[in-house]
Amino acid sequence: MDIKKELPEIFSSFSEARKNGFIKAKELKEKNRPLVGTFCSYMPQEIAMAAGAAVVSLCSTSDETIEEAENYLPKNLCPLIKSSYGFAKTDKCPYFYFSDLIVGETTCDGKKKMYEYLGEFKPVHVMQLPNTQIGENSFKLWKDEIIRLKEKIEDMFDIEIKGEDIKQAILLKNRERQAIKDFYSLGKLKPSALTGMDILNVVNGATFKFNKEESIDEISDLTEKIIKSYKEGKRLPEKPRILITGCPIGGAADKVVKAVEKNGAYVVAFENCTVSKANELLVDENKDVFDALTEKYLAIGCSCMTPNKNRLETLKNMMREYKVDGVIDVILQACHTYAVESFSIKRFVNSNGIPYIPVEIDYSQSNLGQLNTRIGAFIEML
Ligand code: BJ8
């Protein structure tokens, strides 16, 4: 990374990463490097990486194709699912277009049924995720599913994936996770060093950078640069500190972050897939590769799991470490598991002495006024 670049310039290079990644994805294809698309943090990326493939998130975050998707899917369905299907069906997502294989998973009902339709025009492999993290059966099922994914990828790309290839992928992915963690952990600084939008743009953007070594260097340099200017006294004014939890929050869903920061607070922590759910826990580098991957991925605290104690555990640590004043739970419209879990999250957050508010959103920009009013009122009472 050019160290002469100013911070705002670096932040905007990450915000542009998704757009610029389209060309990179095309270049990968021209070099015959496989591209594997995914819709979930449970997908063990190291298996695809061990085959030399690049992995890209296909979760769409814009309402552009929702109307088209509603010709096939119910209106009362999560916008992430409708949007993702809409982009795939209308061929408007270059990442979907260039993907050789889509790896789905049996998380929520809407997604797993949508994969059936995707399979009508793209190779789709669905991993059978257990509903619970507890017990040997769940561990065995998920481990077997990770091995089945390895076999699928070997078969599809006519390649043998050795244990050592997976080990190397684990080491690389861990280094990337650690660099991302070091960066978003800057949110712990009080007063804040950077805004929640900056955190989100960088972490989100990093998922569209296919050269992992380059991306690790860029993120680490950025973290260093921010720490240096913080030590030199460059800090943001003190404001209430918000933690965001719940459904994935990139793209159109970032309107919640914008509303928080427009109404006199900062988002300092994200307990979402976009940020901490996917990165907080590293893969154990000293165990059998399949056991280690099973352990890491099965531990993700998503509301699709029952019970979902890991989400509470993570929230507890994050509320303390980030010195949080309030928690906002973002629930995408018609996401039943997160909506139902909202009650227990409220009870848990409040029992730790922290105010909590759930906000249900879709991808449209039409109800911004209402969202601003609700979030503004919440921040005012902190
Ligand atoms: S690990 S959060 S990426 S499932 S699609 S569950 S919003 S109704 S995305 Fe998710 Fe994996 Fe869990 Fe993370 Fe609800 Fe919509 Fe379903 Fe969703």
Image: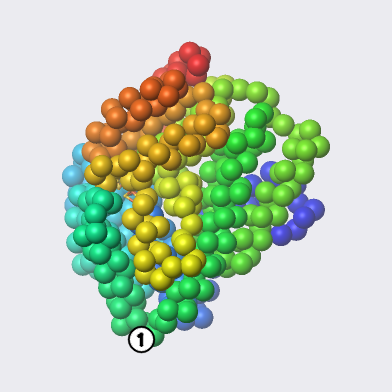
User: Is residue 356 at least partly visible in the picture?
Assistant: no
Residue 38 position within the rendered picture, expressed as x and y whole percent measured from the top left: 36, 61
Residue 284 position within the rendered picture, expressed as x and y whole percent measured from the top left: 47, 62
Amino acid type indicated by mark 1: Asp
Residue under the point 24% across and 33% down: 340
Side of 373 relative to 220 (left or right): left
Q: Is mark 1 within 8 Å of ligand 1?
A: no
Up-down relation of residue 368 to residue 103 (above or below): above
Residue 194 position within the rendered picture, expressed as x and y whole percent measured from the top left: 64, 37
**SS at circle 1:** loop
Residue furthest top as drawn: 381
Up-down relation of residue 352 to residue 218 (above or below): above
Reading the image, the residue beneath label 1 is: 158
Location of the N terminus (image quadrant): bottom right
User: Looking at this view, is 282 or 250 the one in front?
Assistant: 282
Side of 340 relative to 150 (left or right): left
Side of 13 relative to 4 (left or right): left
